[in-house]
Image: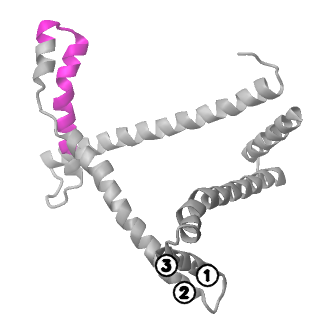
Amino acid sequence: MEFFWLTFAAFLTLAVFSFLYKDNPFYKFAEHLFVGVAAGYVVCVEFYNVFLPNLWRPLTNDGQWGLLIPFALGIALFTRFTSKWAWVSRWPMSIIIGTYAGLAVIGFASGDLVLQLQASMVPVISVPDVAAFTLRPGVISFLQVLANPVFTIGLICVLFYFFFSVEHRGTFRLISTTGTTLLMIGFGAGYGYTVMTRIALLFDRLYFLFVDWLHIAKV
């Protein structure tokens, strides 16, 4: 039985890889199966981990009747499937979007914006790094001394790229171009990291095919 499921998993892996040649029924089967299983899994997780402990059990066992309001709003979402009462679903949908938008703004401000501002507030010259270079001169310690000045200059150039109140000509154009270059380096590094992640996933599938399934390679 274990070999059967391994073979089925290998078939699905090869079916997904077959899309590299062209779109075909095997790929469509694997795609639809993945979407269906994922949707069913999410529904089960939400039912047992969200609906039952947060709504149904407190409502039926503890008598928290205030939960009837979110329960009614949740039921109102299903009116979307009818043409006559579809307008009712706009009310709970607007509450969901407004609530999550507010939470997202707070989460972004505290989790991204504030942390980035704090990380950007560094001294132009780091006294400990200068002291370390004085005691032990070397390439690494010298580069460490240059880290903060380079970071500060790069930050100013990148921010100036988005400053459109002054025409980017002459010296301003040089600063803006430097900011653009640094942005491209950052985007390239992010893209490279994404490619490395996908390659790691590819190696994982190849390891499964050749080691776990066919046993023609050993690690």
- For discs 2 and 3, the disc positioned in front in the rendered view: 3
Q: Amino acid at mark 3?
A: Ile
Q: Mark 1 or mark 2, which has the lower sequence index?
A: 1
Q: Which residue is mark 3?
A: 69
Q: Residues within 10 Å of mark 2 (few under 14, many from 20)?
A: some
Main SS, magenta region, reads: helix
Select label 1 or label 3 by which is in front: 3
Residue 158 position within the rendered picture, expressed as x and y whole percent measured from the top left: 24, 46
Q: Amino acid at mark 1?
A: Arg
Q: Secondary structure at mark 1?
A: helix
| Farthest top residue in view | 136
Is the C-beta separation of discs 1 and 2 under 8 Å? Answer: no
Residue placed at 57% from the left, 67% from the top? 61
Callouts 2 and 3 close, C-beta under 8 Å: no
Q: Is residue 143 magenta?
A: yes
- Assess disc 1: are there few (<14), some (14-19) or many (≥20) residues with their C-alpha within 10 Å of its C-alpha: some
Q: Which residue is found at the position 82% from the left and 50% from the top?
A: 26
Q: Nearer the viewer, residue 59 or 14?
A: 59
Callout 2: SS = helix
Which contiguous range is marked in magenta?
133-157
The extreme bottom residue here reads 84
Residue 149, position as x, y percentages in the image: 16, 31
Front in this rendered view, residue 197 or 79: 79
Give the CA distance from mark 1 to mark 2.
Answer: 8 Å
**105 horizontally vs 89: left or right:** left
Q: Is residue 20 above or below residue 211?
A: below
Mark 1 lies on residue: 80
Residue 182 lies left or right of residue 86; in this view the side is left
Secondary structure type for disc 3: helix
**Alpha-carbon distance for marks 1 and 3?**
18 Å
The mark found on residue 88 in the picture is 2
